[in-house]
Image: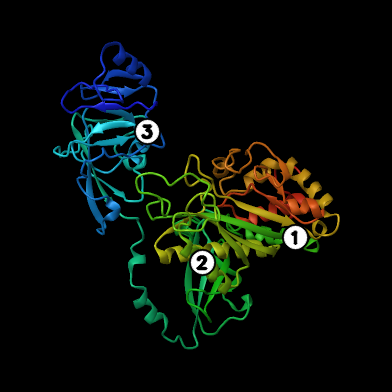
Amino acid sequence: MTDRQVFFDRRSRHSLFFAEEDRTPLAGAARADRIEQFGLDRKKSPSGSGAFTNSRECVIIQNCCNETIAGRRREMPHPELSSSPLCWGITVNLGKVVCVPTIRMQALLTQMSWTYTATEMCYINKIALFSHPKTFSTVFVRFKMQIDVPSRCPIHYSYFSELVREQDTLLIFRYFSTLNIRVRKMATSASSKLSKAVKQQYMDLPQGEKVQAMYIWIDGTGEGLRCKTRTLDFEPKSIDDLPEWNFDGSSTHQSEGSNSDMYLIPAVMFRDPFRKDPNKLVLCEVLKYNRKPAETNLRRSCKRIMRMVENHHPWFGMEQEYTILGTDGHPFGWPSNGFPGPQGPYYCGVGADKAYGRDIVEAHYRACLYAGVQICGTNAEVMPAQWEFQVGPCEGINMGDHLWVARFILHRVCEDFGVVVSFDPKPISGNWNGAGCHTNFSTKEMREEGGLRVIEESIERLAKRHMYHIQAYDPKGGLDNARRLTGHHETSNIDEFSAGVANRSASIRIPRSVGHEKSGYFEDRRPSANCDPYMVTEALVRTCLLKEEGSEPTDYNK
């Protein structure tokens, strides 16, 4: 789309084209030239009315300008200034039938400005429409509805998913139809609005000699965490003091209802930062009815592999990136009717306009320290509302244990604040960074003098098993990472292996300090944010220390 705008005039059933300078109607050759430039063809809508259909899909302009004509009065205050949870209605009148593919509605409505008086313009992706507040009906072809949109959320095409059969179906706005939108504030959970002061007076009650132990496990998705609490008659001093338990696996995607009992086997214990001492968090392994590990219980296999290489003392440090979202799925702190400024000022940023959700980050950090998680740092990431925390160095199986518990604590902290944490590797499509879980790895030999040679040998082995690692580095066998590892936004290409010193666009990065000192560690930048750390660490050990080859892991039980 060029800088020209197309205006629809409510006084005529025919669309008029205007010049930008004086907005005088164009006619004849100039009008034909405008049609040629915009790629607009006159077609018939399903209702029989004339329609301008954008045949070249040139209506998508990500950054449009929402303007008000100078000297004109706004019909109502900007919704952000309202204290009402459900505030000002917005009316946008389309003075002619406009057909756009459903999937394109996102781009059109994302950039919609607030309601103006009849003499003002509403700019929608450089298509300017006369506003006409006297029209009241909301009409789609065969549909009539009102849409509630969070004030911090662009109107996403998924809101229209129930209105059309396919994404390619055209949404038709009839002549002088109106799209009425009620704007509400950032979506947070209802439980976050409950009085924390009232809750605290109960949490302060003495609990006698009893101890609450919250059992935590990974569910059948390989990403989600579940928990439930039991009472113990004494404070457990070690994992051996904790009893086994069970749960309904049919409700966690781990078994059928006809044989649903699954076993919880305590694996590692932490202090409980929510209920505080003497209460405990207990990370568990899951066993099936036959006492064999559940499909998503990757800890059992990882622990066996780590025992095989314990003399090499493998150390890991994982950099967990995540995104804070409202309960509606919109990034925390993002504008309601569009996007924040481009990436650049947010990484390690300071200030209310750069750091979105620092209270959550600080609360999580302190909770992890209390619990005994080996958290070693945190920072704001490149995309606004995206953050990172680092766990490590941890040896062997401890890496997976500590990262999973850190994730659980983050989920619980976000629950208290009424927001959601997402570990999706590409939560927002487009020109925004994805989220990974960069994994730093070293062995005793790598950390000793001359260890750079051992690092280089390990990288050569990793290059030969690239696709094996890609499949191991996200819970969907590489499908999630395919959205993130594009070769852009500080990532490597998922189909190619690369390595380099201080290169954040490579599969493997060797820190510059390691290149100078000739010893240390390397960073595998391929794991996705939603990876299973047991699988990632096991894959690195299999390739670098056990020197496995091929696209499948070796079965050592045979």
Q: How far apart, in angstroms, are the residues tagged by discs 1 and 3? A: 50 Å
Residue type indicated by callout 3: Arg
Q: Is residue 184 visible?
A: no
Cβ–Cβ under 8 Å for marks 3 and 2:
no
Mark 2, other Cα within 10 Å: few <14 / some 14–19 / many ≥20: few
Identified at 66% across, 65% down, the residue is 398
Nearest-to-viewer mark from 1 and 3: 3
Residue 428 placement (x, y as % from top left): 47, 45
Cβ–Cβ under 8 Å for marks 1 and 3:
no
Q: Is residue 280 visible?
A: yes
From this view, report whether residue 178 is shown above or below residue 175.
below
Q: Nearer the viewer, residue 6 or 511?
A: 6
The residue carrying mark 2 is 362
Q: Quadrant of the N terminus?
A: top left
Q: Is residue 82 left or right of residue 154?
A: left
Residue 504 placement (x, y as % from top left): 65, 45
Q: Earlier in the sequence, mark 1 or mark 3?
A: 3
Q: How far apart, in angstroms, are the residues tagged by discs 2 and 1? A: 30 Å
Mark 1, other Cα within 10 Å: few <14 / some 14–19 / many ≥20: many
Q: Which mark is residue 104?
A: 3
Identified at 43% across, 47% down, the residue is 340
Residue type indicated by callout 2: Glu
Q: Is residue 253 left or right of residue 25?
A: right
Residue type indicated by callout 1: Pro
Residue 531 placement (x, y as % from top left): 59, 52
The residue carrying mark 1 is 314
Q: Nearer the viewer, residue 319 or 232?
A: 319
From this view, report whether residue 529 is shown above or below residue 165.
below
Residue lying at the far top of the rendered structure: 29
Q: How far apart, in angstroms, are the residues tagged by discs 3 and 2? A: 39 Å
Nearest-to-viewer mark from 3 and 2: 2
